[in-house]
């Protein structure tokens, strides 16, 4: 939408006419040094051309004035209204990088992929939807470490998620340390809503903190934990002598994951395939809705430099013609 920021400045448009109408003209005595009484015929020949040039200069000056006033009124273009998000949640996402996350019991676009690849695809979309939240990323295996500090920069968070690879943090699973690291990073934060989403396919086999003790610390810090058990219950593979079936989730400690969620007023989820994993993150979206302020913001593009530049160009042309006429 086009508008003028200061439309009242358009009242200055008739100012030159008012000045010409009410102010007395300045008398100029050219004081010719040489008078030749017989040059009247030559003056008559050039009168028509001089009148045409004065008329052109007059209209050009009017155009320059109109453009100048239009620029002073600050024309601008208002973009579509954008809703401003309120201060949202501090949301940490913990992703398991243990060796078992390489198991290919998920499908992505019709192709078999590992659990980590599937988790990355879903978490990436989840992060993109969390406008207004500060996102942090924890990667854990034998050790837990902070991959992304809390940030509003969702693009950087997803880029650093893509860099995660199996074995980067060791081959085991330190669930307790991952929760403890999240508590450490969020304990001093002032936001009321603090959330951890922890996805794993195994049991706690490493680390210095017991998962249930870490859950107690999380509850005391006001951190709500959503736990996700990743992996198919049964996996079929074609071998040389027929179809082979395996149970790849024999190591998943659902009991502990449920206890962690319960102690922190969160929820436990089970993701057996990509569709279930997508539904889980969609459900967390509903349980942890993005807060909105109800206030709108319209991006503004200033346009005053176009009429201003045109006014300066017209004024330069008028000045140039005037100088050539007096030469």
Image (cartoon, grey):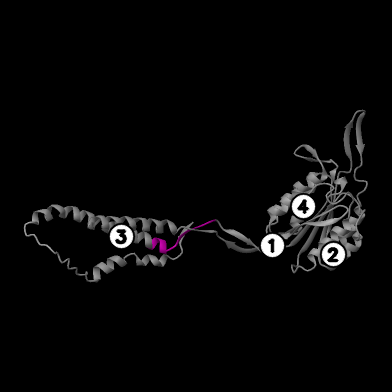
Q: Secondary structure at mark 3?
A: helix
**Which residue is identified by label 2?**
218
For the residues labelled 3 and 2, the Cα–Cα distance comes to 73 Å
Query: Residue 10, percent across and down?
Result: 38, 65
Give whichever of 306, 218 is nearer the camera. 306
Residue denoted by label 3: 62
Outermost residue toward the left? 38
Magenta segment: 69-79
Q: Which mark is residue 33?
A: none
Which residue has dot 4 on it?
281
Q: Tag 2 or tag 1, which sits nearer the N-term? A: 2
Say whether residue 87 is left or right of residue 319.
Answer: right
Query: Marks 3 and 4: CB-CB under 8 Å?
Result: no
**Residue identifier under label 1:** 291
Secondary structure of the residue carrying tag 4 is helix
**Mark 2 Cα-neighbour bin, 10 Å: few <14, some 14–19, many ≥20:** many
Q: CA distance from mark 3 to mark 4?
A: 64 Å
Identity of the residue furthest to the top in this view: 241
Q: Is residue 171 above or below residue 192?
A: above
Judge the density around disc 3: few (<14), some (14-19), many (≥20) Cα neighbours within 10 Å: some
């Amino acid at each position: 939408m086009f508008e003028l920021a200061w439309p009242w400045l358009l009242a200055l448009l008739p100012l030159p006419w008012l000045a010409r109408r009410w102010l007395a003209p300045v008398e100029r005595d050219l004081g010719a040094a040489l008078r030749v009484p017989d040059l009247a015929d030559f003056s008559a020949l050039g009168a028509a051309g001089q009148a045409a040039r004065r008329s052109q200069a007059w209209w050009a000056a009017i155009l320059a004035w109109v453009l100048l006033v239009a620029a002073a009124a600050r024309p601008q273009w208002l973009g579509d209204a954008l809703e401003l998000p309120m201060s949202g949640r501090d949301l940490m996402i913990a992703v398991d990088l243990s060796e078992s996350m390489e198991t290919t019991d998920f499908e992505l676009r019709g192709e078999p992929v590992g659990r980590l690849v599937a988790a990355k695809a879903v978490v990436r979309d989840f992060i993109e939807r969390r406008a207004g939240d500060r996102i942090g990323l924890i990667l854990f295996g034998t050790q837990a470490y902070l991959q992304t500090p809390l940030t509003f920069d969702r693009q950087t968070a997803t880029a650093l998620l893509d860099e995660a690879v199996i074995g980067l943090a060791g081959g085991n699973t330190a669930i307790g340390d991952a929760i403890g690291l999240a508590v450490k990073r969020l304990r001093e934060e002032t936001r009321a809503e603090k959330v951890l989403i922890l996805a794993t396919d195994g049991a706690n086999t490493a680390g210095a903190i017991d998962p249930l003790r870490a859950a107690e610390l999380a509850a005391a810090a006001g951190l709500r934990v959503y736990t996700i058990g990743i992996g198919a219950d049964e996996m079929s593979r074609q071998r040389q002598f027929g179809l082979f079936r395996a149970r790849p989730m024999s190591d998943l400690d659902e009991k502990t994951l449920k206890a962690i969620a319960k102690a922190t007023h969160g929820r436990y989820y089970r993701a057996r395939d990509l569709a279930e994993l997508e539904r889980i993150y969609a459900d967390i979206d509903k349980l942890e809705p993005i807060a909105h302020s109800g206030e709108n913001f319209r991006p503004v593009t200033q346009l005053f430099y176009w009429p201003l530049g045109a006014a300066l160009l017209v004024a330069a042309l008028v000045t140039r013609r005037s100088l050539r006429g007096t030469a």
